[in-house]
Image (tube, rainbow, N blue to C red):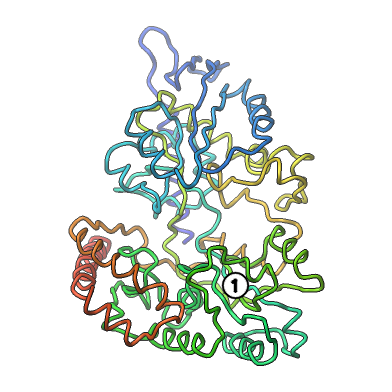
Amino acid sequence: MKRLLSIALVFLIALVTIAGCSGKNEGEGKTSGPSGQTGDGAGGDTKLEEVTLKIMIPGDRPPDMDLVIAEAEKRMKDTINVKLDLVFVPWSDLAQKTQVTLASGENIDLIFDAPWLHINQMIASGFYEPLDDLLAQYGQTVLEKRPPQMWDYNKYGGKIMAVPLGVSYMSGNSYMVRKDIREKLGVPPIKTYEELIDFAYKVKEQEKGIIPMTAGSATYSFVAHHALNDYETHVRPTHALGNSLMLYYKNNDGKVYNLLEDREPIGTWLANTHKWFKDGLIFKDILTTKDFHQPISAGKVAIVTNGAFGIGDSFKNTFKNNVPGGELETVTFFDSTKGANITNFKQWNFLAVPKVSKNKERAIMFLNWANEKENYDLLSYGIEGKHWEAVGGDKMKFLDTSGYPGFGYVWVWNPVDERSDVNSDPANDEKEAVLRDADMFTTDILAGFEFDSTPVQNEVSQYNTVDGQYYNALFNGVIDPDETLKKFEAEAGPALKKIQQELQQQIDEFLAAKAK
């Protein structure tokens, strides 16, 4: 790893050296640079003409956004001289709005995109500018604030096509548990999965009116949540079918497994979950509940899956208002040992520079500015003293999230500058630190692999139709696994097999090329 870091450092130094040797404009002795920039080749004073960057990101515009923009523009006035025009797009409209905007050729300088949105499609259609050279010349801080793994394994066709926005290399996970009920029943702190289920049975037997268990969402199933802490076989979804485990990887061996043919360990998890549902442990309306956290926030559930190590303050406050005297805790089976967790270093969110942008250099200069600690704090958390206050170099306390809720994850996120809440559990902070340290992970053998689904588009569509009928119910224990897998076989077996074969073929080609 040290050797890889040294190579990466040498590479960055070489790029800086090349960038510093830009040619001179004939007869003028001026260095070439971003639009509106002039200067002498000896590094004298430079002056940048004011430009306005149009940035399209998801979410709702915060009430105090204008205050933050004004402060940012004030700081940039005498350096990169940028004005900001932020366009917020509702999450529900994001896919269509961003796609239509790009297709129309409207001038956008920075735009949010993601693998779960349409970044692969937009790159393939030529909408985004390759960033390797721009980052080497104008984005050194952007490069330095993300480790080599975040860059190496988030390229497309060997090029940096968008800046990865992330602070970790896998998600935290836990179960929210009613601590007050656990203590009332005389159950000691829960340390194992078996103890969690035993507690659920005790709730069923002794706490009438309390639902023992429910999932945080129908798609984030009990079986999938259990798989997150599978340290024996490391089961995980494939590149082909999203979060579906009908095809899956295990053992980090580069093989694609088909649940219709290779049942274990998932088959055991399915059988157990179905038993729990029949025994009345799992919320009977799990598939039809729209607000999945509402039952526990109302004090009606003892255990719920949680996609983080901690519990947000807003949720805690809602729970306290609804359940006076109640208390929540989190239970996780995450192993923080170095190398215990496998990651492909893929990030979920990205910021791209559209080809149509007239200010590509300035856009990267802005991102470089935004990835400096003081400016990162401003754009991520708002005005210090009004919206938040610093607690040391890496923690913070929220003061007014109603005026400026944190949303750095859609435009500036990096793992170096992100602060943690001073009120968070120190034990959770330690786990989060593991998630942010690339060197704590075992690298997925398929890191850097991209699946081209074009050859099996029809089969994927056919599978998805069947998946929509059975998958959520199956993986939350609602229906019998043996009977349901027979239906999968009859209705989607051939399609699933063809997807598996195509995925395996592409993986084999990827691994063979990597071995050369």
The answer to whether residue 189 is left or right of residue 23 is: right
Element at badge 1? strand
Question: Which residue is located at x 69 percent, y 61 percent?
Answer: 315
Name the spot of residue 302 as percent of width and height, x first: 66, 79
The answer to whether residue 54 is left or right of residue 467 is: right
Question: Which residue is located at x 73 percent, y 78 percent?
Answer: 179
Question: Which residue is located at x 75 percent, y 45 percent?
Answer: 400
Name the spot of residue 421 as percent of width and height, x first: 71, 56
Task: Identify the residue position indicated by label 1 in the image.
Answer: 174
The residue most toward the right is: 325
Q: Amino acid at mark 1?
A: Ser
Name the spot of residue 30 as percent of width and height, x first: 44, 13
The residue most toward the top is: 27
Q: Residues within 10 Å of mark 1 (few under 14, many from 20)?
A: many
Q: Quadrant of residue 330?
A: bottom right
Q: Quadrant of residue 208?
A: bottom right
- Front residue of 506/457: it is 457
14 vs 339: above or below = above
**Quick one: quadrant of the C terminus?**
bottom left
- Front residue of 273/130: it is 273
The answer to whether residue 208 is left or right of residue 164 is: right
229 vs 70: above or below = below
